[in-house]
Amino acid sequence: MCEINIQYNFMYRSLPHLLGETWKDIPGFEGSYQASNYGRVKSLDRVVPHPRLKQQFVKGRILTQSVYKNKNIKTGQPMIDLWAALSIEGIPHYFNTRRIIYQTFIDPTLNYEKDGFYVINKDYNGYDNKLVNLRLCTKSENQKRAINRDR
């Protein structure tokens, strides 16, 4: 375990655990990917199918998260989302990092679209996806937050 001095945890791509960091299997991707309570996502060491070699060993690593920036039309301020790509049998699946962390540590059965919930950052900072900074809200609550912030 180590302590680092970077602005956001997702930027730290070294495998040693951060101080106080815990890892759990991502539901639906058990044995292949894990998420941390600090908002990081990693692949695990595994053997995958290979067209020529039949099988290939792939070493686990911390995944690079894609940053998506949208500009708020009214204020011009950026709105940030982090995304991670998880691949099973060569098929990529793209997920919002907030949802991965929330689903892994809080509620693996929640269907966000069907149930009408959003996972949001408490401090409005899309770069900070630590478990303690996430909460679930309804579409109505999310819209009220936007109105209260004049967004």
Image: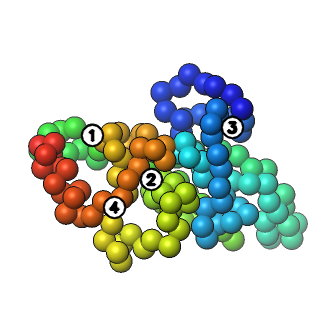
Mark 3 vs mark 4, CA separation in Å: 28 Å
**Circle 3 residues within 10 Å: few <14, some 14–19, many ≥20:** some
Mark 1 vs mark 3, CA separation in Å: 30 Å
Q: Residue at x 12, y 49 (%)?
A: 147
Secondary structure under tag 3 reads: loop
Task: Tell me which numbered mark, 2 or 3, is placed earlier along the sequence.
Answer: 3
Q: Nearer the viewer, mark 2 or mark 1?
A: 2
Q: Which of the two residues, 74 or 24, is positioned nearer the viewer here?
A: 24
Does the residue at mark 2 contact the one at mark 1 (Cβ under 8 Å)? no
Residue topped by disc 4: 118
Residue topped by disc 2: 98
Residue topped by disc 1: 78
Image side of residue 141 versus residue 93, left or right: left
Q: Which of the two residues, 2 or 51, is positioned nearer the viewer here?
A: 2
Task: Tell me which numbered mark, 1 or 4, is placed earlier along the sequence.
Answer: 1
Task: Tell me which numbered mark, 1 or 3, is placed earlier along the sequence.
Answer: 3
Q: Would you say residue 94 is visible in this rendering?
A: no
Residue topped by disc 3: 17
Which quarter of the image is occupied by the N terminus? top right
How many marks are shown on the rendered structure?
A: 4
